Amino acid sequence: MFTSNPFAELSASISPGVMQAYVIVMILLVAGGTLFDIVHKKSAKYFFNAWRKAKDKGSRQVGGGEMMSLAARTAAVDVLTSGEFCNAQRRIAHLLGMYGFVVYVIATIVMVFSYPTPATPTPAIWPALWYTGALMVCLGGYWFWFFIRVDVAAEGNSPFRLVRADLFIVSLLGCVTFGLIWAFLQTAGSSWATIFLGLYLIATTVLFGSIPWSKFSHMFFKPAAAFQKRVEQANGSRRNLPPPADAPELYGSARRQPQNY
């Protein structure tokens, strides 16, 4: 199962061209939804205005070399290691979901476009990455959903309570969960495979088509916001107030130790 390309098997009933067209449509939905979100919420205008104000208020100029250093630090701390999370469990769950989703999407694109039929044997690494990425998303996502969410862990609400803000995580978990079940049933030759294929496609379409109403586009905005904060910190336009006792200093890169007075 873990070495079998589920999309190559599906080509017996659905044309590879149809699968490839569907993936392209999903990519266009991501691009279009993100642009719509930027225009509708005026995110780009807000960032540019904030950047200009910070530059005017700054007590010093940040040079090109320092700007590159800040960008590299943002990528290493805030993007690649999710340093903004001070809670270790939440950070691990986020990293599992983030890297799992990236691996899952890349493996999907490679298998659909490069190895769409059994006539072109799929290297075992790609199905293995597809399953591994999906399982990572499930592990991080369900761990977050049932045990880490604030309204569940701290406020005692039911984990099955849904609000609009949950659209992204629910559709993401539905996408990978139904995808795994469909791939397993298809390999087993079960008649239920068609049903779960339909659920898989519905969840995937909701995930990539609901960007203007979900938190999907936040993954593009957060690095920009983190970089802006670092620049403001460097040029002196951001006030250096002490963070809360349980919050990370420097946007999650370190913790401030309690001080004795």
Image: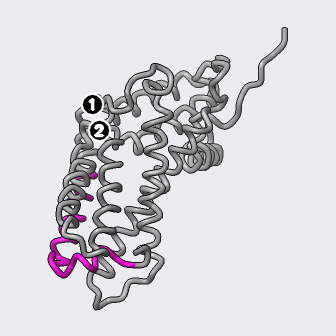
Residue 43, quarter of picture: top left
Marks 1 and 2, how far apart at CA? 6 Å
Q: In the image, residue 73 lies at what x, y percent?
A: 63, 45
Q: Which residue is mark 2?
A: 167
| Quadrant in which the C terminus appears | top right
Image vertical order of residue 185 relative to residue 213, above or below: below
Where residue 109 appears, x then y in whole percent?
33, 69
Number of numbered labels in the structure image = 2
> 98 and 163: which one is in front?
163
Q: Is residue 148 above or below residue 12?
A: above
Looking at the rendered structure, the secondary structure element under dot 1 is helix
Instruction: From this view, report whether residue 47 is shown above or below residue 16.
Output: above
Residue 135 pos. (x, y %): 45, 58
Disc 1 crowd, CA 10 A, few/some/many (<14, 14-19, 20+): few
Residue range in magenta is 4-32
The amino acid type of the residue labelled 2 equals Leu
Q: Which secondary structure dominates the residues rendered in magenta?
A: helix
Determine which of the numbered discs, if any, sits on residue 46 in the image: none
- Residue type, label 1: Arg
Residue 135 in view in this figure? yes
Q: Is residue 216 left or right of residue 123?
A: left
Q: Which residue is mark 1?
A: 164
Q: Is residue 81 magenta?
A: no
Quick one: label 2, few (<14), some, or many (20+) residues within 10 Å?
some
Are circles 1 and 2 on residues that touch, CB within 8 Å? yes
The quadrant of the rendering that contains the N terminus is: bottom left
- Is residue 25 shown in magenta? yes
Q: Is residue 240 visible?
A: no
